[in-house]
Image: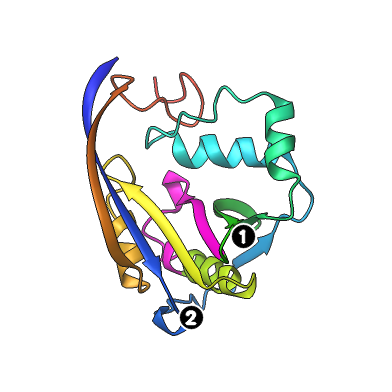
């Protein structure tokens, strides 16, 4: 374990008109809602997308914890597929005060740089507004992908807060599963 300085940026949209869409015309790209709560699917997406970026908080969740979290009307999971293969996902969570948080968003390593991220984020934000949001917000940090902050800002999210703290982390990201890159 190492001590890391983590900078977290909080961003928001206060109106659907702030969204600057980036939609792909790739006929092999499809974004669909996973309408049946599935801990197996969400755990796979979480570790496959987040394994390169220190997403470790949910790795210790039990099956029951995943079910309890996902089996709520406030949570929606949208999955991007390229040629039928999961490429990434966006998880939305409705919160009090007509807010929707982009709880998780990202692509698997092999799908970055293919103009999928802007498309998936656009679809996800459109869905957040369709959920009745008056505010859509997200946070990202310097441990996320190198284009995360830029993608959020390019889609119209505005920075409203920045925090820096120290966190104890593994010496390197664990990958999509333990030992995947060794």
Query: On the picture, is 85 further left or further right than 140?
Result: right
Residue 113 in the magenta stretch? The answer is: yes
Residue 161 sits above or below residue 181 on the image? below
Q: How many marks?
A: 2
Q: Secondary structure at mark 2?
A: helix
**Which residue is farthest top?**
1
Left or right: residue 22 compared with residue 124: left
Residue at the location (62% across, 66% down)? Answer: 30
Magenta-span inclusion, residue 69: no
The CA distance from mark 1 to mark 2 is 30 Å
The x and y percentages for residue 151 are: 34, 64
Report the colour scheme: rainbow
Label 2, on which residue? 16
| Residue 101: % across, % down | 51, 57
Residue at 54% from the left image edge and 39% from the top image edge? 46
Tell me the number on the disc at residue 139: none
Q: Of callouts 1 and 2, which one flags the residue occurring earlier in the amino acid sequence?
A: 2
Q: Circle 2: is it few (<14), some (14-19), or many (20+) Cα within 10 Å?
A: some
Pick the quarter of the image with the C terminus: top left
143 with respect to 66 (left or right): left
Q: Secondary structure at mark 1?
A: loop
Residue name at image x 46 percent, y 51 percent: 106
Bounds of the magenta segment: 99-118
Residue 111 on image: x %, y %:
45, 53
Quadrant in the picture for residue 3: top left
User: As drawn, is 171 to the left or to the right of 73?
Assistant: left
Task: Say few, some or many: other residues with alpha carbon within 10 Å of mark 1 (under 14 / 14 to 19 / 20 or more).
Answer: few
Q: Which residue is mark 1?
A: 83
**Residue farthest along the bottom direction in this orientation:** 17
């Amino acid at each position: 374990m190492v001590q890391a300085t983590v900078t977290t940026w909080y961003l928001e949209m206060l109106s659907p008109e702030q969204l600057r869409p980036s939609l792909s015309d790739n006929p092999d790209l499809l974004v669909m809602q996973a309408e049946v709560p599935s801990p197996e699917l969400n755990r796979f997406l979480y570790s496959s997308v987040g394994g390169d970026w220190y997403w470790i908080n949910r790795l210790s969740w039990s099956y029951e914890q995943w079910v309890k979290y996902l089996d709520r009307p406030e949570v929606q999971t949208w999955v991007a597929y390229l040629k039928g293969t999961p490429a990434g996902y966006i998880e939305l969570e409705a919160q009090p005060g007509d807010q929707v948080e982009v709880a998780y968003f990202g692509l698997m390593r092999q799908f970055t740089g293919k103009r999928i991220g802007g498309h998936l984020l656009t679809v996800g934000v459109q869905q957040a507004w369709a959920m009745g949001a008056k505010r859509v917000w997200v946070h990202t940090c310097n441990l996320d992908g190198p284009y995360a902050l830029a993608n959020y800002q390019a889609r119209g999210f505005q920075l409203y807060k920045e925090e820096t703290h120290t966190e104890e982390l593994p010496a390197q990201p664990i990958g999509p599963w333990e030992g995947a890159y060794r």
